[in-house]
């Protein structure tokens, strides 16, 4: 070892780098990271090799084969090393994007499960609360088929799994809500592309809300809650929002879905 360079035993080097002694011996055997052997045969590493060891770990995580890593570290890929690293980086970018989407999906599903639990505890029991202002995207379609809305949002989002990642529901006109149902004319989502293309503000204010079973289509609880608003001495204002809470991702049958109904209150 050169003067001033710290010598590390295989155990010390293993503890410092997080690479097991077994892996270090393997690296030595294939010529990936070679220690200096003393007269008695013990392996000895320099502190300068710590950075090399960390680079090896990072390149392995990037799924480069050990043979390529060895050549890169030895400077034997100068002609096409940059090309190979660029390809590796592109593949990593795609994997990172997929992992970020999976991370977002899991986070959204955790939120939905928590809201579903709250809905189960308050099922069919109206409550009044203040909601914050937010912005959604609006899709207006003249169709009786809810699946037509989903198909169009899938096209806009360029992602067939958008409903696993974002809230959605419908905005209803109060005068169109009857005891036997209502038309679905305007779907809202929080899909970023949809919000950017067709932004629509949802104002802050007090609402009478209720969780109930059933689908977003012709749910009798919407008409029932309108009656509750008036029976409690409130006046409804603006449009009604019905939102998915635990739809087809969690439940198998529409009758088991949980939705949330929000009716804005006048003067709030």
Image: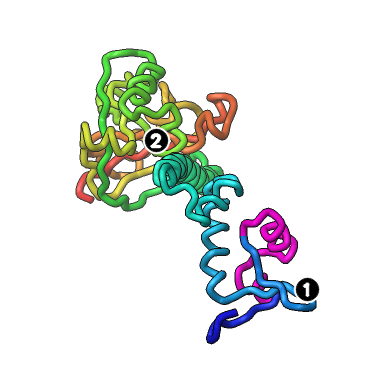
Note whether 253 is above or below 57 in the view shown.
above
Under circle 2, the secondary element is strand
Q: In the image shown, does 264 or 17 lie closer to the viewer?
A: 17
Note whether residue 188 is visible. yes
Q: In the image shown, does 121 or 153 lie closer to the viewer?
A: 153
Q: Position of residue 124 (x, y in %)?
A: 49, 39
> How many numbered marks, from 0 up?
2
Q: Residue furthest bottom?
A: 4
Q: Which mark is residue 149?
A: none
Kindly identify which residue carries mark 1.
41
Question: Is 25 inside the magenta-drawn segment?
Answer: yes
Q: Is residue 62 left or right of residue 179?
A: right
Q: Which mark is residue 243?
A: 2
Note whether residue 210 is visible. no
Under circle 1, the secondary element is loop
Q: Residue at x 35, y 44 (%)?
A: 208
CA–CA distance in space, label 2 to label 1: 70 Å
Characterize the local packing of mark 1: few (<14), some (14-19) or many (20 or more) Cα atoms within 10 angstroms. Answer: few
Q: Quadrant of residue 63?
A: top right
Q: Which residues are magenta?
A: 12-32
Q: Residue at x 30, y 44 (%)?
A: 233
């Amino acid at each position: 070892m050169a003067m001033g360079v710290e010598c590390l035993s295989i155990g010390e080097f293993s503890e410092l780098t997080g690479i097991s002694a077994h892996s270090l011996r393997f690296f030595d055997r294939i010529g990936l990271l070679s220690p200096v052997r003393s007269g008695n045969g013990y392996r000895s590493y320099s502190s300068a090799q710590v950075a090399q060891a960390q680079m090896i770990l990072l390149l392995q995580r990037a799924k480069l084969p050990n043979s390529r890593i060895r050549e890169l570290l030895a400077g034997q890929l100068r002609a096409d090393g940059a090309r190979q690293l660029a390809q590796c980086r592109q593949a990593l970018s795609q994997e990172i994007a997929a992992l970020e989407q999976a991370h977002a999906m899991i986070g959204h599903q955790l939120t939905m499960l928590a809201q579903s639990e709250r809905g189960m505890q308050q099922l069919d029991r109206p409550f009044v609360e203040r909601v914050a202002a937010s912005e959604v995207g609006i899709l207006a379609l003249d169709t009786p088929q809810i699946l037509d809305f989903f198909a169009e949002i899938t096209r806009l989002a360029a992602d067939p799994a958008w409903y696993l990642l974002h809230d959605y529901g419908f905005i209803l006109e109060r005068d169109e809500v009857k005891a036997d149902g209502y038309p679905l004319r305007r779907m809202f989502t929080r899909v970023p592309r949809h919000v950017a293309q067709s932004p629509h503000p949802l104002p802050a204010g007090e609402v009478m809300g209720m969780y109930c079973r059933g689908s977003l289509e012709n749910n009798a609880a919407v008409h029932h809650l309108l009656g509750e608003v008036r029976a409690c001495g409130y006046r409804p204002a603006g449009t009604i929002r019905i939102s998915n809470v635990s739809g087809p991702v969690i439940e198998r049958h529409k009758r088991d879905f949980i939705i949330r109904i929000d009716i804005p209150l006048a003067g709030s």
